[in-house]
Image (spheres, rainbow, N blue to C red):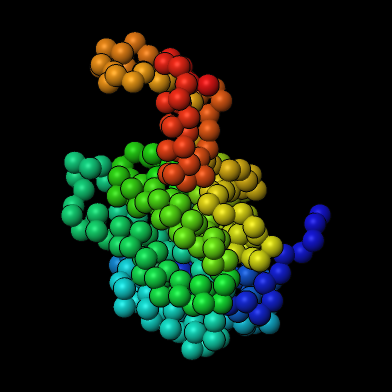
Amino acid sequence: MSAEVRLDGQVVIVTGAGNGIGRAHAVLLAERGARVVVNDLGGAVDGSGSSGAAQRVVDEIRAAGGVAVASTDSIATAAGGADLVARAVHEYGRIDAVIHNAGILRDSTLAKMREEDVTAVLDVHLAGAFHVLRPAWGQMAERGYGRIVLTSSSSGLFGNFGQANYGAAKAGLIGLMNVLALEGARRGILVNAIAPTAATRMTENLLGELTDRFDPRHVAAVATYLASGQCQLNRHILTVGGGRVGRIFVGVTPGWYGGVEPVSPDDIRASIDDICRLDDFIIPDSGADEVTLIQRALSGPAGPTV
Ligand code: NAD
Protein backbone atom coordinates (compact mmCIF):
# COMPACT_ATOMS: atom_id res chain seq x y z
CA MET A 1 0.00 0.00 0.00
CA SER A 2 2.89 2.38 0.79
CA ALA A 3 6.58 2.58 1.67
CA GLU A 4 7.38 0.55 4.75
CA VAL A 5 7.70 2.35 8.08
CA ARG A 6 10.93 1.11 9.67
CA LEU A 7 12.64 1.82 12.98
CA ASP A 8 15.77 -0.27 12.46
CA GLY A 9 18.11 0.05 15.42
CA GLN A 10 16.04 2.76 17.05
CA VAL A 11 15.44 2.57 20.78
CA VAL A 12 11.84 2.92 21.88
CA ILE A 13 10.52 2.91 25.44
CA VAL A 14 6.93 1.70 25.78
CA THR A 15 5.37 2.11 29.21
CA GLY A 16 2.67 -0.35 30.24
CA ALA A 17 3.79 -2.73 27.49
CA GLY A 18 3.07 -5.95 29.37
CA ASN A 19 -0.56 -6.19 28.29
CA GLY A 20 -3.17 -4.96 25.86
CA ILE A 21 -2.34 -2.01 23.63
CA GLY A 22 1.20 -1.51 24.96
CA ARG A 23 2.07 -5.13 24.27
CA ALA A 24 0.85 -4.69 20.68
CA HIS A 25 3.00 -1.55 20.35
CA ALA A 26 6.09 -3.37 21.60
CA VAL A 27 5.62 -6.39 19.34
CA LEU A 28 5.02 -4.30 16.21
CA LEU A 29 7.88 -1.90 16.96
CA ALA A 30 10.23 -4.86 17.32
CA GLU A 31 8.93 -6.34 14.06
CA ARG A 32 9.80 -3.03 12.43
CA GLY A 33 13.37 -3.20 13.69
CA ALA A 34 13.21 -1.18 16.91
CA ARG A 35 15.01 -2.17 20.08
CA VAL A 36 12.20 -2.01 22.60
CA VAL A 37 12.31 -1.30 26.31
CA VAL A 38 9.20 -3.10 27.52
CA ASN A 39 8.19 -1.38 30.73
CA ASP A 40 5.44 -2.80 32.89
CA LEU A 41 4.85 -2.99 36.57
CA GLY A 42 2.56 -5.93 35.86
CA GLY A 43 -0.32 -4.86 38.10
CA ALA A 44 -4.07 -5.42 37.86
CA VAL A 45 -6.36 -2.97 36.05
CA ASP A 46 -6.62 -0.88 39.23
CA GLY A 47 -2.82 -0.81 39.57
CA SER A 48 -2.55 -3.27 42.48
CA GLY A 49 -0.15 -6.23 42.59
CA SER A 50 2.62 -7.17 40.16
CA SER A 51 3.51 -9.95 37.74
CA GLY A 52 6.02 -10.89 35.06
CA ALA A 53 4.06 -9.27 32.23
CA ALA A 54 7.01 -7.26 30.83
CA GLN A 55 9.34 -10.27 30.69
CA ARG A 56 6.69 -12.36 28.92
CA VAL A 57 6.44 -9.75 26.15
CA VAL A 58 10.23 -9.57 25.91
CA ASP A 59 10.39 -13.37 25.59
CA GLU A 60 7.77 -13.23 22.85
CA ILE A 61 9.70 -10.53 20.94
CA ARG A 62 13.01 -12.39 21.27
CA ALA A 63 11.42 -15.66 20.15
CA ALA A 64 10.36 -13.88 16.97
CA GLY A 65 13.92 -12.63 16.42
CA GLY A 66 13.40 -9.13 17.83
CA VAL A 67 15.39 -7.11 20.34
CA ALA A 68 13.87 -6.11 23.66
CA VAL A 69 14.59 -5.73 27.33
CA ALA A 70 12.19 -5.68 30.28
CA SER A 71 11.76 -3.00 32.91
CA THR A 72 9.43 -3.50 35.86
CA ASP A 73 9.79 0.06 37.15
CA SER A 74 6.62 1.83 38.18
CA ILE A 75 6.39 5.02 36.19
CA ALA A 76 4.02 6.36 38.83
CA THR A 77 7.10 7.66 40.67
CA ALA A 78 9.91 9.96 39.56
CA ALA A 79 12.46 7.37 40.73
CA GLY A 80 10.77 4.67 38.62
CA GLY A 81 10.78 6.89 35.52
CA ALA A 82 14.44 7.76 36.03
CA ASP A 83 15.38 4.09 36.46
CA LEU A 84 13.47 3.16 33.31
CA VAL A 85 15.27 5.78 31.23
CA ALA A 86 18.62 4.83 32.79
CA ARG A 87 17.92 1.20 31.89
CA ALA A 88 17.25 2.13 28.26
CA VAL A 89 20.44 4.19 28.01
CA HIS A 90 22.53 1.58 29.81
CA GLU A 91 21.20 -1.22 27.61
CA TYR A 92 21.10 0.48 24.21
CA GLY A 93 22.97 3.79 24.57
CA ARG A 94 20.22 6.14 23.39
CA ILE A 95 16.49 6.85 23.23
CA ASP A 96 14.73 7.64 19.97
CA ALA A 97 11.11 7.46 21.05
CA VAL A 98 8.89 7.14 24.08
CA ILE A 99 5.36 5.82 23.93
CA HIS A 100 3.68 6.53 27.25
CA ASN A 101 0.88 4.02 27.39
CA ALA A 102 0.74 2.76 30.99
CA GLY A 103 -2.63 3.19 32.59
CA ILE A 104 -4.97 2.13 35.35
CA LEU A 105 -8.64 2.66 36.13
CA ARG A 106 -10.31 3.61 39.40
CA ASP A 107 -13.77 4.46 38.12
CA SER A 108 -16.48 6.03 40.29
CA THR A 109 -18.62 9.11 40.29
CA LEU A 110 -17.07 12.19 41.89
CA ALA A 111 -19.47 11.83 44.84
CA LYS A 112 -17.96 8.44 45.68
CA MET A 113 -14.39 9.01 44.55
CA ARG A 114 -11.73 8.56 47.23
CA GLU A 115 -8.66 10.75 47.42
CA GLU A 116 -6.45 7.74 46.65
CA ASP A 117 -8.47 7.05 43.47
CA VAL A 118 -7.63 10.55 42.27
CA THR A 119 -3.92 10.45 43.06
CA ALA A 120 -3.36 6.87 41.86
CA VAL A 121 -4.85 7.62 38.44
CA LEU A 122 -3.19 11.01 38.02
CA ASP A 123 0.15 9.52 39.12
CA VAL A 124 0.22 6.80 36.46
CA HIS A 125 -1.27 8.62 33.47
CA LEU A 126 -0.28 12.27 33.90
CA ALA A 127 2.57 12.50 36.41
CA GLY A 128 3.88 9.26 34.87
CA ALA A 129 4.43 11.10 31.60
CA PHE A 130 6.58 13.67 33.41
CA HIS A 131 8.44 10.95 35.29
CA VAL A 132 9.57 9.32 32.04
CA LEU A 133 9.82 12.33 29.73
CA ARG A 134 11.83 14.60 32.01
CA PRO A 135 14.83 12.25 32.09
CA ALA A 136 14.35 11.11 28.46
CA TRP A 137 14.02 14.64 27.06
CA GLY A 138 17.70 15.59 27.58
CA GLN A 139 18.84 12.43 25.78
CA MET A 140 16.70 13.29 22.79
CA ALA A 141 17.44 17.02 22.76
CA GLU A 142 21.18 16.35 22.84
CA ARG A 143 20.94 14.22 19.69
CA GLY A 144 18.45 16.58 18.04
CA TYR A 145 15.91 13.82 17.45
CA GLY A 146 12.96 12.34 19.27
CA ARG A 147 9.42 11.10 18.92
CA ILE A 148 6.92 11.11 21.79
CA VAL A 149 3.52 9.48 21.70
CA LEU A 150 1.14 10.11 24.59
CA THR A 151 -1.96 8.02 25.20
CA SER A 152 -5.05 10.12 25.74
CA SER A 153 -8.65 8.95 25.61
CA SER A 154 -12.09 9.89 24.38
CA SER A 155 -13.00 9.92 28.09
CA GLY A 156 -10.82 12.98 28.57
CA LEU A 157 -11.45 14.62 25.22
CA PHE A 158 -15.22 14.11 25.08
CA GLY A 159 -16.19 12.89 28.58
CA ASN A 160 -17.33 9.59 30.05
CA PHE A 161 -19.60 9.09 33.05
CA GLY A 162 -17.78 7.92 36.19
CA GLN A 163 -14.26 8.72 35.02
CA ALA A 164 -13.49 12.17 36.42
CA ASN A 165 -10.00 11.14 37.60
CA TYR A 166 -9.16 9.29 34.39
CA GLY A 167 -10.71 11.88 32.07
CA ALA A 168 -8.85 14.73 33.75
CA ALA A 169 -5.55 12.85 33.50
CA LYS A 170 -6.13 12.01 29.85
CA ALA A 171 -7.07 15.60 28.98
CA GLY A 172 -4.02 16.77 30.94
CA LEU A 173 -1.83 14.75 28.59
CA ILE A 174 -3.13 16.89 25.71
CA GLY A 175 -2.01 20.02 27.54
CA LEU A 176 1.38 18.40 27.99
CA MET A 177 1.52 17.48 24.30
CA ASN A 178 0.65 21.04 23.24
CA VAL A 179 3.51 22.54 25.22
CA LEU A 180 6.15 19.87 24.58
CA ALA A 181 5.40 20.00 20.85
CA LEU A 182 6.35 23.68 20.87
CA GLU A 183 9.41 23.15 23.07
CA GLY A 184 10.58 20.10 21.12
CA ALA A 185 10.14 21.30 17.55
CA ARG A 186 13.42 23.22 17.50
CA ARG A 187 15.25 20.17 18.85
CA GLY A 188 13.84 17.67 16.40
CA ILE A 189 11.44 16.22 18.96
CA LEU A 190 7.89 15.72 17.72
CA VAL A 191 5.08 15.10 20.20
CA ASN A 192 1.72 13.59 19.32
CA ALA A 193 -1.07 11.72 21.07
CA ILE A 194 -3.44 8.87 20.36
CA ALA A 195 -6.95 8.29 21.63
CA PRO A 196 -7.38 4.52 21.23
CA THR A 197 -10.27 2.12 21.48
CA ALA A 198 -9.27 -1.54 21.74
CA ALA A 199 -10.42 -4.81 23.22
CA THR A 200 -8.24 -5.28 26.31
CA ARG A 201 -8.84 -6.20 29.93
CA MET A 202 -9.56 -2.48 30.50
CA THR A 203 -12.55 -2.54 28.14
CA GLU A 204 -13.86 -6.02 28.98
CA ASN A 205 -17.64 -6.14 28.38
CA LEU A 206 -17.69 -2.53 27.12
CA LEU A 207 -17.34 -2.81 23.35
CA GLY A 208 -20.41 -4.94 22.58
CA GLU A 209 -20.84 -7.31 19.68
CA LEU A 210 -17.97 -5.91 17.57
CA THR A 211 -15.43 -6.51 20.35
CA ASP A 212 -13.35 -8.86 18.20
CA ARG A 213 -12.85 -6.10 15.63
CA PHE A 214 -11.13 -3.83 18.16
CA ASP A 215 -7.76 -5.54 17.88
CA PRO A 216 -5.02 -3.57 19.71
CA ARG A 217 -2.83 -4.06 16.62
CA HIS A 218 -4.86 -1.35 14.87
CA VAL A 219 -3.72 1.05 17.59
CA ALA A 220 -0.14 -0.20 17.42
CA ALA A 221 0.04 0.67 13.72
CA VAL A 222 -0.77 4.31 14.47
CA ALA A 223 1.60 4.54 17.46
CA THR A 224 4.41 2.89 15.50
CA TYR A 225 4.00 5.38 12.68
CA LEU A 226 3.96 8.32 15.12
CA ALA A 227 7.08 6.92 16.84
CA SER A 228 8.98 6.62 13.57
CA GLY A 229 11.24 9.02 11.71
CA GLN A 230 8.79 8.94 8.80
CA CYS A 231 6.27 10.81 10.94
CA GLN A 232 6.50 14.57 10.54
CA LEU A 233 3.27 15.36 12.39
CA ASN A 234 3.57 17.45 15.52
CA ARG A 235 0.89 18.32 18.10
CA HIS A 236 -1.70 16.02 16.55
CA ILE A 237 -4.21 13.74 18.26
CA LEU A 238 -5.12 10.64 16.25
CA THR A 239 -8.09 8.57 17.29
CA VAL A 240 -7.93 4.89 16.35
CA GLY A 241 -10.21 1.95 16.98
CA GLY A 242 -10.99 -1.16 14.96
CA GLY A 243 -9.10 0.11 11.92
CA ARG A 244 -10.85 3.49 11.74
CA VAL A 245 -8.37 6.34 12.21
CA GLY A 246 -9.24 10.03 12.49
CA ARG A 247 -7.94 13.30 13.84
CA ILE A 248 -9.27 14.95 17.00
CA PHE A 249 -8.49 18.63 17.39
CA VAL A 250 -9.12 21.61 19.63
CA GLY A 251 -10.59 24.51 17.70
CA VAL A 252 -12.12 27.87 18.38
CA THR A 253 -15.06 29.57 16.74
CA PRO A 254 -14.46 32.88 14.93
CA GLY A 255 -16.63 34.27 17.73
CA TRP A 256 -18.12 37.64 18.35
CA TYR A 257 -16.52 40.99 19.17
CA GLY A 258 -18.34 43.32 21.55
CA GLY A 259 -16.41 46.54 20.84
CA VAL A 260 -13.92 48.67 22.78
CA GLU A 261 -16.06 49.18 25.88
CA PRO A 262 -16.48 46.18 28.23
CA VAL A 263 -19.59 44.25 27.26
CA SER A 264 -22.38 43.39 29.68
CA PRO A 265 -23.68 39.92 30.61
CA ASP A 266 -26.81 40.93 28.65
CA ASP A 267 -24.69 41.41 25.49
CA ILE A 268 -23.22 37.93 25.99
CA ARG A 269 -26.69 36.50 26.46
CA ALA A 270 -27.93 38.21 23.29
CA SER A 271 -24.92 37.05 21.25
CA ILE A 272 -24.44 33.54 22.59
CA ASP A 273 -25.41 31.89 19.28
CA ASP A 274 -22.84 33.96 17.35
CA ILE A 275 -20.21 33.20 20.01
CA CYS A 276 -20.80 29.45 19.78
CA ARG A 277 -21.43 29.13 16.02
CA LEU A 278 -19.10 26.42 14.72
CA ASP A 279 -18.94 27.59 11.09
CA ASP A 280 -15.41 28.43 9.95
CA PHE A 281 -13.80 27.28 13.20
CA ILE A 282 -10.06 27.75 13.54
CA ILE A 283 -7.40 25.41 14.96
CA PRO A 284 -4.73 27.66 16.52
CA ASP A 285 -1.13 26.44 16.39
CA SER A 286 -0.45 27.68 19.93
CA GLY A 287 -1.84 29.92 22.66
CA ALA A 288 0.08 32.81 21.11
CA ASP A 289 -1.60 32.07 17.79
CA GLU A 290 -4.98 32.51 19.45
CA VAL A 291 -3.88 35.89 20.83
CA THR A 292 -3.10 36.92 17.24
CA LEU A 293 -6.62 35.88 16.24
CA ILE A 294 -8.08 37.99 19.05
CA GLN A 295 -5.96 40.98 18.03
CA ARG A 296 -7.25 40.65 14.48
CA ALA A 297 -10.85 40.66 15.75
CA LEU A 298 -10.14 43.77 17.83
CA SER A 299 -9.10 45.69 14.74
CA GLY A 300 -12.41 44.88 13.02
CA PRO A 301 -15.97 46.04 13.62
CA ALA A 302 -18.11 44.92 16.58
CA GLY A 303 -20.41 41.94 15.96
CA PRO A 304 -19.80 38.42 14.66
CA THR A 305 -16.12 37.97 13.83
CA VAL A 306 -15.16 36.89 10.33
P1 NAD B 1 -4.13 -2.70 30.06
O1 NAD B 1 -4.59 -2.72 31.47
O2 NAD B 1 -4.22 -3.94 29.26
O3 NAD B 1 -2.63 -2.17 29.97
C1 NAD B 1 -2.12 -1.15 30.78
C2 NAD B 1 -0.76 -1.59 31.28
O4 NAD B 1 -0.19 -0.53 32.05
C3 NAD B 1 -0.84 -2.82 32.19
O5 NAD B 1 -0.03 -3.86 31.68
C4 NAD B 1 -0.33 -2.31 33.52
O6 NAD B 1 0.39 -3.28 34.29
C5 NAD B 1 0.55 -1.14 33.10
N1 NAD B 1 0.78 -0.21 34.20
C6 NAD B 1 -0.14 0.30 35.05
N2 NAD B 1 0.45 1.07 35.96
C7 NAD B 1 1.78 1.08 35.68
C8 NAD B 1 2.88 1.70 36.26
N3 NAD B 1 2.77 2.49 37.35
N4 NAD B 1 4.11 1.50 35.72
C9 NAD B 1 4.26 0.69 34.64
N5 NAD B 1 3.22 0.06 34.04
C10 NAD B 1 2.00 0.26 34.56
O7 NAD B 1 -4.97 -1.54 29.34
P2 NAD B 1 -5.00 -1.04 27.81
O8 NAD B 1 -6.42 -1.03 27.41
O9 NAD B 1 -4.01 -1.75 26.99
O10 NAD B 1 -4.57 0.49 28.01
C11 NAD B 1 -3.38 1.05 27.48
C12 NAD B 1 -3.50 2.56 27.49
O11 NAD B 1 -4.53 2.95 26.57
C13 NAD B 1 -3.90 3.15 28.83
O12 NAD B 1 -3.23 4.38 29.03
C14 NAD B 1 -5.37 3.39 28.68
O13 NAD B 1 -5.84 4.39 29.56
C15 NAD B 1 -5.44 3.80 27.23
N6 NAD B 1 -6.76 3.66 26.64
C16 NAD B 1 -7.26 2.43 26.37
C17 NAD B 1 -8.51 2.34 25.76
C18 NAD B 1 -9.08 1.01 25.36
O14 NAD B 1 -10.09 1.02 24.63
N7 NAD B 1 -8.49 -0.10 25.75
C19 NAD B 1 -9.26 3.50 25.50
C20 NAD B 1 -8.71 4.74 25.79
C21 NAD B 1 -7.44 4.81 26.34
Q: Nearer the viewer, residue 180 or 202?
A: 180
What is the quadrant of residue 7 in the picture? bottom right
What is the quadrant of residue 67 in the picture? bottom right
Quadrant for ligand 1 reads bottom left
Coordinates of residue 45 in the picture (x, y in percent): 37, 61
| Residue plotted at (46% across, 37% down) | 292
Q: Is residue 135 visible?
A: yes
Vertical placement of residue 35 versus 177, above or below: below
Coordinates of residue 200 in the picture (x, y in percent): 49, 57
Coordinates of residue 164 in the picture (x, y in percent): 30, 45
Left or right of 186? Residue 177 is: left
Vertical placement of residue 15 versus 208, above or below: below
What is the quadrant of residue 4 in the picture? bottom right
Count of numbered tags: 0
| Residue plotted at (54% across, 63% down) | 186
| Residue plotted at (42% across, 16% down) | 302
Q: Nearer the viewer, residue 35 or 216?
A: 35
Left or right of 25? Residue 305 is: left
Coordinates of residue 82 in the picture (x, y in percent): 37, 78
| Residue plotted at (34% across, 77% down) | 80
Q: Nearer the viewer, residue 282 or 177?
A: 282
Q: Which quadrant of the rendered structure holds the N terminus?
A: bottom right
Q: Is residue 252 visible?
A: no
Q: Residue furthest bottom?
A: 90
